[in-house]
Image: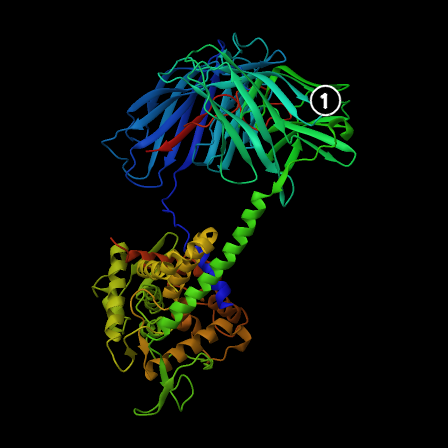
Amino acid sequence: MALVLLLAGLGVALMPVPAHAAEDVITDMSVDFDIRADGTVAVRYEIDWQFGDRGRHGIEFDIVTRESWEADRTRDVLYDISDLRVSSPSGAPDTVTWEAKENGSDGSLDLRIGDPDETIDGREATYVITYVIRGALRTFDGKPEFYWDVTSRDNPAIDNITLRVTAPGSIPAARCLIGTAPCATTITDGVAVLAGGGVPSGTPVTVVAALAPDTVADAEPRLEGRRVDSPTLKAIDGSIEVTADGMTHVEQALTYLMPEKAGTVAPTLLLTLPVRRPFSDSKDQVFRIANLVVDGSTGPGMAPPVVSGKPTSRQDMTAEVPLASSSEPQTVRLSYDVAGAVATDGDTASARWVLAPVASGILDSLHVTWTMPADVRRARCLELRKGRDSADCTHAELGTTGNTIIWQHDGGPSLYVADVWVEADVDPAAVGNVAPILEPGLDAAARGRVRTGVGLGIAALVGSVAMVVLLGRIRVVRDRRWADVAPGLSAPAGSRVRTARRGDIVPVRFEEPECSLALAGLVVDGRPGRHHTAALLVHMAVQGAVRIQSAPLQVTGISASPLTEPLEREMYGDPTSTDTVFDRHKLGRMNDAVLTHQKKLLEDDSLFVAGRRRPGFFLNHTTLVWGFVVAALAWVPLTSKVMPGLLAPYGTAILYGTLIGCVAGMNIFRAPGPRWGLRPRATALRDQVEGFRHYIATAEANQLDFEAGQDIYRRYLPWAVLFGLTERWTRVCQELAASGRIPTLDTSFWSGDRSAAGIAGGMTSLASAVRSAGSASSPGRGGSGGSSGFSSRSSGGGGGGTSSKSW
């Protein structure tokens, strides 16, 4: 079990730890859309922004001005932005600079609000942004409509959002979507109010409003021809012929849209054809391409095709084709032969080949004809984006006549043709019962290597742990205990002692240990710790010296007079101070006082002996560095001239196993700083503490035995805090009070939720605050509105959109 927990913990402990910077949150966003009779829309955003970190200058707010038109990918839709104004009612710097950005079909107006020489005073600010949009309305079935993305996938979380839409006439219907979930909608006196909350970061919000007919003069989008920033496939016209010997001959003409602005370097196309795909769990199907000819390039000539990618079961052959530096559409013609695209299985032969020589592409026009050597029994389109897994294409427009298959597509929604294949079944005799070209699966071999590597890596890990542990045990200082008395009891000086063993049974103790809280934490943990301060603070609180408030967390000094322990009086500080809130610096000084006191206790050689003590697990810079050093030394034999040939495929796994194992071993026998060994007297105190912890952790209300009238709740609460058992102890004592065995719990020292869970949560927050007090001081694109926002398939994705972040 220990090994399993070790292996599981290492996977988490050694993962890169991200910087946990607080995230920005929009606490409230209010957006007004005033649709005017001329078809323009006046927009007003009021944003209450809560910054995750101090020292921010302001926010960036980007507005979409151009995007691809969803109804026809050959065109882009444009939005004109005018009358832009920015202000900050909260007084935050509201200087605005903007930049119009264009990248192919994407365009935006990017605003930067704030002053680079001035930061926000605090962590909250309010911004008001107003502008006018032309081109935001649509018409569906003769009815005008406003279908708009209020935010995009590049916005922080939003606690509350309210949208208001007004129009020249009535608004027959309206809706809004947070991602795909609808939000509350009301229409009163021609004003649509839509509200929601809890919008996760990266979730778009969309508003839809139907307008009364003939109330706006212009409800049509502003469209232009599609603009691209690199050669983009637009159309395919070609033929594929499967001959009687099983060969496949392909001829295609590929038409590309070219960038409007020709660059100084001639553009280059990358044609991609498959040469290997998974066939089964252990086999790959291989396609052999020959006689590849590309005509239409005007550059220095086509580079020889090469097989690209890693040696996996999905490999492609690529060919670079230079084009003329021109903004006019260009057509590339190619032809080639394929062996292995036809495979016989029983009484059926299937011819399967890719539709287009592209790794990704969106087509506007497609005219392709397949000619088979016999009548086609079945034809279908497949999407093979996940190895052998296939799915029937939803957009296929295949027609079959005799031995001919035709796929013709003109206009309408564009076709996505990345890794789209066409498969045709014929009589196997028509292709000579040709068999597929199969080779051992590269992915299967890789999986085998991974399994072997994991095994060797685990072996290296376990071996490294064992090696370091064996070395570490030589240097361990063992705890000592009295040999002739029961655990938890002391013996006279000079009595016989022995080494403490794991099998020593510590009895349950029904009363407090015979030591202070600070010493109890020290003998259990083996080193000073800031987490002990919280228990001491609670002990001061139950004595009436301080008061603890949970919401917000706050410690207030009342009076030092009830305190008798010198350490606690030192923690309180000025004895004349009353009703004083202990700030972060004061809590830090309390931590320092506790650590100093515990370090002095460690100098008592009747209790402690310096050196490493029992095993403990902790990852710090020292153990990590030493782990790397030991791993490097262990790795030397693997880099010799004899080992690389044998271990080359598994070297990385063995290296990581060795590294993790060495770090684990270092962790087992090295905690941050030395861990003091315990003399017999200290071991007896530790037994008392462990026995009392067991009592607090296991005793139920009907099992507790105490003297009548004793306030056991307040008396033992500091110990429960030290043990991390606050909730359980509070619940048990509440049950005692409910049964009348003890008076109602006196929690006057505590302000806030006085339930068991509430007090436990507050104590956890207190411990966390005390520990930390000692620490060193491009916009998202929605759809273009190519369909009505009231259609059954709409789920967000209107036109336009905004994105925002802090800077």
SS class, disc 1: loop
Q: Is residue 20 above or below residue 556?
A: above
Q: Is residue 526 above or below residue 352?
A: below
Q: Is residue 353 left or right of residue 126?
A: right
Its colouring scheme is rainbow
- Is residue 71 at least partly visible in the picture? no
Q: Is residue 375 left or right of residue 731?
A: right
Q: Is residue 435 left or right of residue 411?
A: right
In the figure, residue 536 lies in which quadrant? bottom left
Q: Position of residue 798 (x, y in %)?
A: 53, 23
Q: Position of residue 2 (x, y in %)?
A: 48, 68
In the figure, residue 510 lies in which quadrant? bottom left
Quarter of the image for the C terminus: give it.
top left
**Crowd class of label 1 (few under 14; some 14 to 19; many from 20; radius 10 Å):** many
Please give the residue where the numbered disc 1 appears in the rendered image. 372
Q: Is residue 358 above or below residue 729?
A: above
Could you say which is closer to the camera, residue 357 or residue 411?
Answer: 357
Residue at point 29% right, 39% down? Answer: 122
Q: Position of residue 259 (x, y in %)?
A: 43, 15
Q: Position of residue 571 (x, y in %)?
A: 25, 65
Residue at point 74% right, 31% down? Answer: 349
Could you say which is closer to the camera, residue 601 or residue 614?
Answer: 614
In the figure, residue 404 lies in which quadrant? top right
The residue type indicated by label 1 comes to: Met
- Is residue 477 at least partly visible in the picture? yes
Q: Is residue 761 left or right of residue 173?
A: left
Could you say which is closer to the camera, residue 372 or residue 74?
Answer: 372
